[in-house]
Amino acid sequence: MKKLKYLIFLFPFFIFTGCTSYTELNELGIVSLLGIDYQNQKYHLYINIVEGNQEDGTLEKESIFYETEAKTLDQAFQKLYAKSNKKIYLSHMDCLLLTENAMNTHLRDIIIYLLNQRDTRNNFELVQTQSDMKDIFKGKMESKDLMDLIKTNEQYMGTTKSITFEEFLEEILIDQNTYLPLISYQDEFEVEGISLIQNFKVLDYVSKEDTILINLLKNQIHQAIYQDTTIYKNQTNLTYKKNQVTFHIQMEVNKKNQHLQKELEEQLKGLINKYQEKEYDILKLSYQMKQNHLFSFQNRSILPENIQLKFEIQMKTVDNYLEKELPI
C-alpha cells in the first residue's frame, strides 16, 4: 500500500518534467537535404539546415547552407556541429545526394555510417548527382523541389525511378546490384535517367529513353512517352519455363504504330542482352528464377547470360484518351 502511495505521489513529476532527451526547437538544426562528395582524400559534406528559433510562442525558420571537409565522416559531421552551433537533426532528412566519386571510393563506408546513426531513418531517398554539389546547395534548393521532380518524372514520364535507403539496401543484399535516380543541376534540377550500381560502384548510366524500357520490363510504368507514342497503361507479367523467361506486356497507347511493337521487342531484348554481357542482372532474373524454385539447370549456372528471353507484346489503341493525370 505504501508503494502505491509513493507512485501516486511521484506520478505528476513524470508528466510535467518531460523526457530528458527533449530538445528545444531553437536548439535543433533540421537537415532535409544532405550531400556527400569525396575529393582529394577527404569527405565533403553539404547540408541545408532549417534552423528553428522560437520566440514569444512563434517559430521562425531559416535555411542555412554549411559545408565541411575531413578525412572521416565522423570528423566531417563533428565540424558541422561546431559550425552550426545546433544539434544536427537527421531524422527528418528527406534525401541524400551522392556523387560518383563518393560512391566509387566509399559507398560501403557511407552505408555503414548511416546505419550506425541512431537519429536517422531508413526511408529517406537516395539520389546521384552529376553536378557540382556546392552549386546545388548554394542555390538553396530544397529537398521537396528535388523529390517532386523525381516523382513527377517517374509517374508521368517513366524516365527515372526513385529509391529509398531501405530499398537500396534490400537490392544490394540480393546480388550487390541496384540503381539510383540520376540528376544534374544548372539553376534548377533536371532528371537524367538512372545510374546502375554494381559491387558498390557506378557501373553505367542509363538514358531517360532506356530507363522507360527498364520500367516497362519491371511493370513500373504509370504513364510514359516513348518515340512519340504515349503509353497510358501498362501491365507486364513474367512466366518461367526451364531457363526461359517470357515477358507478357499489355499496353494502351494513343495511336497505332505498326513498327513500334516489333521495334520495342528488339529494344527490350537488346537492353537486357547488353547488361547480360556485362554480367549485370538488370532485372534480377536469376534471383526471381531461384525464388520460383526453377531448378531445371544447376543453381551455379543460373546466370544472366544463360537465361533465354521471349516477348509477347500487345498494344491497344485508346482514342481521345483524357490525359487528366498530367500535372498542370
Image (cartoon, grey):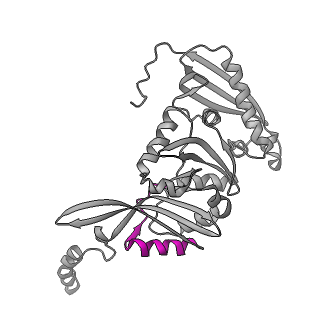
Q: Quadrant of the C terminus?
A: top left
Can you give x and y, in whole percent of width and height, for residue 49 in the image? 39, 62
Range of residues picked out in magenta: 72-95
Can you give x and y, in whole percent of width and height, for residue 320 in the image? 46, 13
Residue 158 visible, this orientation: yes
Above or below residue 96? Residue 308 is above
Q: Position of 27 compared to 262: left or right?
A: left
Relative to the observer, which residue lies in front, 139 or 144? 139
Above or below residue 160? Residue 261 is above
Q: Position of 242 compared to 247: left or right?
A: right
Q: Position of 273 compared to 13: left or right?
A: right
Q: Is residue 78 magenta?
A: yes
Residue sitting at 71 percent across and 22 percent down? 263
Q: Quadrant of the N terminus?
A: bottom left
Above or below residue 203? Residue 152 is above
Can you give x and y, in whole percent of width and height, for residue 302 in the image? 79, 45
Q: Is residue 292 magenta?
A: no
Can you give x and y, in whole percent of width and height, for residue 196 in the image? 66, 47
**Number of on-image labels:** 0
Q: Position of 86 compared to 218: left or right?
A: left
Relative to the observer, which residue lies in front, 308 or 226? 226
Residue sitting at 20 percent across and 87 percent down? 2
Residue sitting at 46 percent across and 62 percent down? 47
